[in-house]
């Protein structure tokens, strides 16, 4: 059982938010470059921009803390030594919170700050962030 879930804002392949947004810009530029001259004569710039923006927009994460639901159950949590020794202790754990959000769940997996030495932990299930022991209920 993971004590507090996975590391949001982290991918093993080191792709971060900046990389993902730059890739989105490349895709957008390619899409615009592929548009026909005929389309520009038939539609306004605003109509074309609105259509393309719908397809390539990145929806930010909007976390609904007011709709969070706590659960309290007895469980055992593995706590690992923070200094890298192979010792672990099992301690009682009680709380978990499920927090709904809107936006692209993949954004939780993209690193936003490469210098954060204390990142949060949690599990992403659909459009819910779960903080606390991942094997509970």
Image (spheres, rainbow, N blue to C red):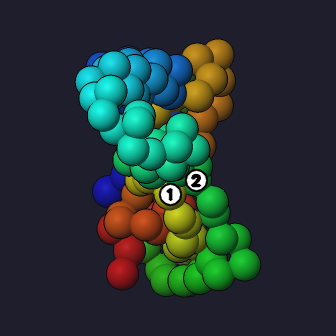
The picture places residue 132, in percent across and down from the top left corner, at 52, 63
The picture quadrant where one finds residue 27 is top left
Q: Nearer the viewer, residue 28 or 9?
A: 28
Q: Name the residue under label 2.
A: 61
Label 1 element class: loop
Q: Is residue 45 left or right of residue 30?
A: right
Which residue sits furthest right? 66
The numbered dot on residue 103 is 1
User: Considering depth in this image, is 20 or 101 the residue closer to the camera?
Assistant: 20
Q: Are marks 2 and 1 in contact (CB under 8 Å)?
A: yes
Residue sitting at x 53%, y 64%: 102
Say above or below: 93 vs 39: below
Q: Where is residue 1, by image quadrant?
A: bottom left
Q: Could you say where residue 86 lies in the image, as x and y percent from the top left?
A: 35, 28
Q: How far apart are marks 2 and 1 (CA)?
A: 5 Å
Percent across and percent down for residue 101 are 55, 66
Can you see residue 71? yes
Q: Describe residue 97's horizontal placement relative to residue 6 as left or right.
A: right
Please report the residue visible at 45 percent of the width from the left and 23 percent of the height from the top. 25
**Between disc 2 and disc 1, whose residue precedes?**
2
Please say if 4 is above or below 46. below
Which structural element holds mark 2? loop
Residue 137 or 62: which is nearer the viewer? 62
Q: Where is residue 69 in the image (x, y as percent from the top left)?
A: 59, 82
Tell me the quadrant of the picture where the C terminus can be found: bottom left
Is residue 79 shown to the viewer in this render?
Answer: no
Q: What is the number of callouts on the image?
A: 2
- Residue 20 placement, left or right of 1: right
Above or below, 98 against 49 in this view is below
């Amino acid at each position: 059982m993971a004590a507090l879930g996975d590391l949001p804002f982290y991918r093993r392949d080191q792709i971060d938010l900046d990389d993902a947004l730059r890739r989105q810009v490349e895709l957008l530029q390619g899409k615009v470059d592929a548009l026909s001259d005929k389309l520009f004569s038939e539609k306004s710039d605003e109509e074309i921009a609105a259509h393309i923006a719908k397809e390539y927009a990145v929806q930010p994460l909007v976390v609904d803390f007011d709709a969070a639901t706590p659960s309290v159950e007895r469980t055992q949590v593995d706590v690992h030594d923070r200094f890298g020794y192979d010792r672990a202790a099992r301690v009682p754990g009680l709380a978990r919170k499920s927090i709904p959000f809107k936006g692209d769940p993949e954004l939780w997996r993209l690193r936003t700050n490469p210098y954060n030495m204390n990142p949060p932990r949690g599990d992403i299930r659909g459009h819910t962030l779960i903080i606390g022991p991942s094997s509970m209920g």
